[in-house]
Amino acid sequence: MTIDSELSRIGISLPKHLLDQFDQIINYRGYASRSEGIRDAIRSYIQYYKWMADVKGERQGVITMIYDHDQRGLLVVLTDIQHEFKGIIQASLHSHVTESRCLEVILLRGDGTQLKSLAERLMSQKGVESVKLTTIGLED
């Protein structure tokens, strides 16, 4: 039996709206089952994590973040985290997507490990729906 064919069963709990959105996507993309869609999503997550691990050296970047404005205490935590990284944050832009969802764009410049650390801190907060870090190396 190959590694890919050895299956393990897991159980997860998801908010209904998240599962509904996931079901729409797997139906649209033609997956045979949720399991197939989840495996693909996990592969993408692993690939993104590996790419993030290679973010090194002096870089320019942007973080796009979507979060729940109504999540208790989240705004204070996000502000505190950004203040911890003020040395690499050049500017930020905040937009209200809906009554409770916000989009924030953060421009960065500094060591890639710091940029990655900021993104990981933000994405680990409860109420943060999405964080995407995009960077480019600085060339003369």
Image (cartoon, rainbow, N blue to C red):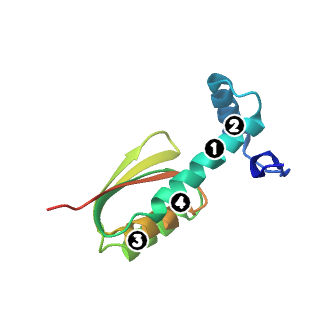
Q: CA distance from mark 3 to mark 4?
A: 15 Å
Report the residue marked by disc 1: 41
Q: Secondary structure at mark 4?
A: helix
Query: Left or right of 33: which side holds 112?
Result: left
Report the residue marked by disc 3: 113
| Figure quadrant of residue 72 | bottom right
Name which residue type carries label 4.
Answer: Met
Q: Secondary structure at mark 1?
A: helix
Q: CA distance from mark 4 to mark 2?
A: 22 Å
Q: Secondary structure at mark 3?
A: helix
Please name the residue shown 48% across and 67% down the image.
Answer: 76
Query: Left or right of 127: which side holds 26?
Result: right
Asked if 126 appears above or below 104 in the picture, the reply is below
Asked if 75 appears above or below 48 in the picture, the reply is below
Callout 2 touching callout 1 (CB < 8 Å): yes
Q: Earlier in the sequence, mark 4 or mark 1?
A: 1
Report the residue marked by disc 2: 37
Query: Left or right of 88: which side holds 40?
Result: right
Q: Position of residue 66 (x, y in %)?
A: 48, 49
